[in-house]
């Protein structure tokens, strides 16, 4: 490898993409194309980076398996950064296998971290944890140890394990300082905000307050009866009743929980649950049916009882009832939570991460863009959506994996 390629590679490893480009910007041989692609990715031109990396992989040819595999890993990282979650993951897996077979453990570990980061984004936390099993970060350089610690922290945050998240982020801080790469240090600082900014609202007794992630964890571990508006579930005494596919029942449960220990009038429930401006006998009959369905679903943890003027919720055990909600609640809040990471998302990537249909996600940004909440760019069938991060709030914490059992 010639001296310019070596110097450019060292510049990239140190987080200096402009220094790398000064050495290889005018070259079109395979190593230079690969380095140019990585440099453009670090500078944020992801579309150009993808083209250069594909040209580099083609230029290396079939005999240079390791170099081709490294290009595939770099392209996978570009796809992840651009939230192209539909990028063929089997290519990254094959590249990692090739790198491991040839003893390139550092790039193989990087490929593993990319696989796990994608799994975290789409909520497959069990698979993400299995992907990290057997990977010893002590063998890796400081930058790779930072990436490993950030991945571990990401899983812990989604699992609502704040102690483990703090420990992992502390390791990330130490490794990032050792690496001395400004972009990496900035990424660690952004991750630290997760534990320092409000993660949810707790609504109880007609009052609400913002809470940090560790308070959410403590609340779910307590004997409190929780109606979880982040996951559309009811939790109590280590039991979870999922109401994700039962929006009417969840709305009813939430209304009753917010009024605890009092009851809610029938007409008020009809207006909230069914959206009816004026309740008639058919609405009241339907309300009785839905209340009966909710009573059957919650019978192990609570009673939904009829009162003289409406309905009330009474837990089987425990005296506290709260509603756990997003810090800022509005229509399509889950979509906005993903977009608030500052990255540009396509509708298909959001659908994959949220586990919903492409068209459902498309309907959400359309309305928000009109209201000035979002910005979009690109045309045809593949526009990308972006929104500035919401200051002072942690947005992706409760998405999209199921909450722990206790």
Image (cartoon, rainbow, N blue to C red):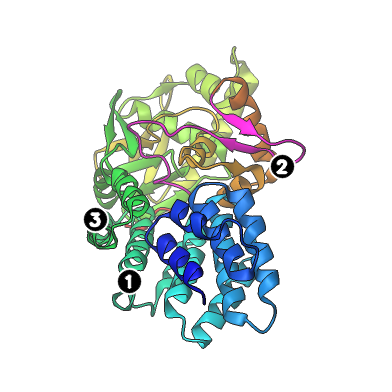
Taking the spot 71% from the left edge, 42% from the top edge, the residue there is 382
Find numbered disc 2 in the image and state the secondary structure of the residue it sits on: loop
Vertical position of residue 201 compared to residue 2: above or below: above
What's the distance in space between the residues labelled 2 and 3, CA to CA?
A: 38 Å
Which residue shows up at 42% across the image and 37% down it?
304
Task: Give the position of the C terminus as an image quadrant.
Answer: bottom left
* Front position in the image: 164 or 173: 173
What is the x, y in percent for residue 314?
34, 37
Q: Which mark is residue 141?
A: 1
Q: Residues within 10 Å of mark 1 (few under 14, many from 20)?
A: few
Q: Nearer the viewer, mark 2 or mark 3?
A: 2
* As drawn, 41 above or below 337: below
Residue 270 pos. (x, y %): 54, 22
Cα separation, mark 1 vs mark 2, equals 38 Å
Identify residue for label 2: 382
Give the vertical position of 371 relative to 346 (above or below). above
Q: Which residues are magenta?
A: 373-399
Residue under pointer 3: 166
Q: Residues within 10 Å of mark 2 (few under 14, many from 20)?
A: few
Q: Main secondary structure of the magenta part?
A: loop
């Amino acid at each position: 490898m010639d001296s310019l390629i070596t110097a450019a590679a060292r510049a990239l490893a140190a987080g200096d993409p402009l220094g790398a480009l000064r050495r290889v910007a005018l070259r079109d041989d395979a190593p230079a194309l690969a380095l140019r692609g990585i440099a453009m990715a670090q500078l944020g031109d992801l579309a150009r980076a993808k083209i250069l990396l594909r040209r580099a992989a083609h230029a290396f040819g079939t005999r240079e398996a390791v170099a081709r595999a490294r290009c595939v890993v770099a392209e996978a990282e570009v796809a992840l950064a651009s939230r192209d979650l539909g990028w063929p993951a089997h290519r990254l897996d094959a590249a990692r296998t090739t790198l491991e077979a040839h003893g390139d453990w550092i790039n193989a570990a990087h490929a593993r971290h990319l696989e796990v980061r994608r799994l975290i984004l789409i909520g497959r936390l069990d698979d993400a944890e299995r992907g990290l099993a057997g990977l010893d970060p002590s063998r890796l350089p400081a930058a790779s140890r930072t990436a490993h610690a950030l991945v571990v922290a990401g899983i812990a945050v989604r699992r609502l394990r704040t102690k483990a998240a703090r420990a992992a982020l502390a390791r990330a801080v130490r490794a990032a300082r050792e690496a001395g790469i400004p972009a990496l240090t900035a990424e660690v600082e952004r991750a630290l905000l997760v534990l320092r900014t409000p993660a949810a609202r707790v609504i109880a007794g007609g009052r609400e307050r913002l809470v940090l992630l560790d308070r959410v964890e403590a609340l779910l571990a307590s004997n409190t009866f929780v109606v979880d508006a982040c996951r559309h579930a009811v939790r109590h005494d280590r039991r979870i009743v999922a109401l994700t596919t039962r929006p009417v029942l969840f709305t009813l449960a939430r209304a009753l929980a917010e009024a605890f220990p009092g009851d809610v009038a029938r007409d008020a429930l009809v207006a909230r649950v069914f959206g009816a401006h004026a309740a008639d006998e058919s609405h009241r009959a339907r309300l009785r049916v839905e209340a009966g369905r909710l009573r059957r679903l919650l019978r192990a943890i609570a009673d939904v009882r009829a009162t003289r003027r409406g309905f009330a919720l009474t837990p089987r055990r425990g005296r506290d009832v709260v509603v756990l909600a997003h810090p800022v609640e509005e229509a399509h809040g889950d979509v906005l939570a993903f977009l608030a990471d500052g990255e540009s998302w396509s509708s298909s990537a959001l659908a994959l991460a949220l586990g919903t249909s492409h068209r459902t996600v498309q309907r959400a940004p359309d309305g928000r863009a009109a209201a000035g909440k979002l910005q979009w760019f690109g045309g045809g069938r593949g526009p990308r959506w972006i929104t500035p991060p919401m200051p002072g709030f942690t947005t992706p914490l409760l998405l999209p994996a199921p909450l722990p059992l206790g």
